[in-house]
Image (cartoon, grey):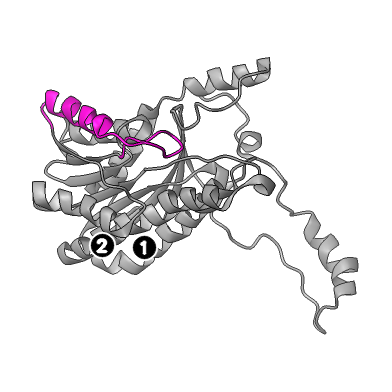
Amino acid sequence: MGSMMQDKVVVVTGAGGGIGRDIALALAAEGARVVVNDLGTSSTGEGASAGPAQQVVDEIRAAGGEAVANADSVSEAVAASRIVQCALDHFGRIDGVVNNAGILRDRFFHKMSVDEFDAVVKVHLYGSWFVSRAAAPHFKEQNSGAMVHMTSTSGLIGNFGQANYSAAKLGLVALSKSIALDMQKFGVRSNRIAPFAWSRMIGTIPTETPEEQQRVERMKRMTPGKIAPLAVYLLSDAAAGVSAQVFAVRNNEIFLMSQPRPLRSVHRGEGWTPQGIAEHGMPALKASFVPMDRSADVFCWDPV
């Protein structure tokens, strides 16, 4: 057992399986007391079961750690506040939050229903806001606290058939930055991780062609356990100077991701006309256009 997180109390949402489970186990192994939150739904958000969260708690306890299960939904404010209250009731404090809970309702944009958009945004974006907001007064009072939010290259870069998920995940990047700025004076940090890992959430990827099968085999090497070390580090005091950053983790690679900044500018003293933009402005900017690529186009090499 390590001691990097000794006596700290951390809430991990969606921790009944996949990435969340591995983060919860890794935190406990470093001495943290963990609230393992999971609704126990399917990857699309249907059904519910307290089983997955309790199994992870049992694993942590069997290894000599401390944990408690919670089955409240992140997607409603009152329920999300109960997740934070669960930490206070059982362990007397809260030091960290990992916003990892998520569902997928993939569909091409022109076919996506209101419900499919709403459900995904509620869990990923509202869920992260509700849990973070519930923890914020406690962090402010004790002048310390750390948040780790799971974003995705689907939002940072792009992907087919994920308008709901991409919008929520990029919204989360801005939310995290705002938290980092607003709460810096209280010693509170907020960072994001875009994980590449094989979990049931991406287990729905088609494997009809040999290329698709190959891609999935590659992805299976990226185990959820590879994400956990960075999450644990970011929640620890060792990361005191690290806030407002976006990281990506892909097997044994850790990336620091860029955040939007001006690329290039054009200027005309007398101002622009639509025609002037067409003839001079846009051609000058075009060399720096961002290509219409997807996550897989940018991260196109085998995980190392």
**In the image, which disc is placed on residue 179?**
1
* Image quarter of the N terminus: top left
**In the image, which disc is placed on residue 136?**
2
Where residue 292 appears, as percent x and y from the top left, is 72, 45
Amino acid residing under circle 1: Ile
- Residue at 90% from the left image edge and 73% from the top image edge: 275
Q: Is residue 243 visible?
A: no
Q: From the viewer's perspective, is 187 left or right of 278?
A: left
Compared with 177, 116 (above or below) is: above
Q: Is residue 292 visible?
A: yes
Q: Nearer the viewer, residue 183 or 55?
A: 55
Q: Nearer the viewer, residue 77 or 221?
A: 77
Where residue 302 appears, as percent x and y from the top left, is 57, 24
Q: From the viewer's perspective, is 274 left or right of 304?
A: right
Where residue 145 appears, as percent x and y from the top left, is 23, 56
- Residue at 17% from the left image edge and 54% from the top image edge: 85
Q: Nearer the viewer, residue 300 or 59?
A: 59
Q: Which residues are magenta?
A: 39-65
Q: Earlier in the sequence, mark 1 or mark 2?
A: 2
Magenta span contains residue 62: yes
Q: Residue furthest top?
A: 210
Classify 10 Å Cα crowding around label 1: few (below 14), some (14-19), many (20 and above): many
Which image quarter: residue 26?
A: top left
Circle 1/circle 2 CB separation < 8 Å: yes
Amino acid residing under circle 2: Ala
Where residue 279 appears, as percent x and y from the top left, is 91, 67
Which tag is nearer the camera, tag 1 or tag 2?
2
- Residue at 28% from the left image edge and 69% from the top image edge: 185
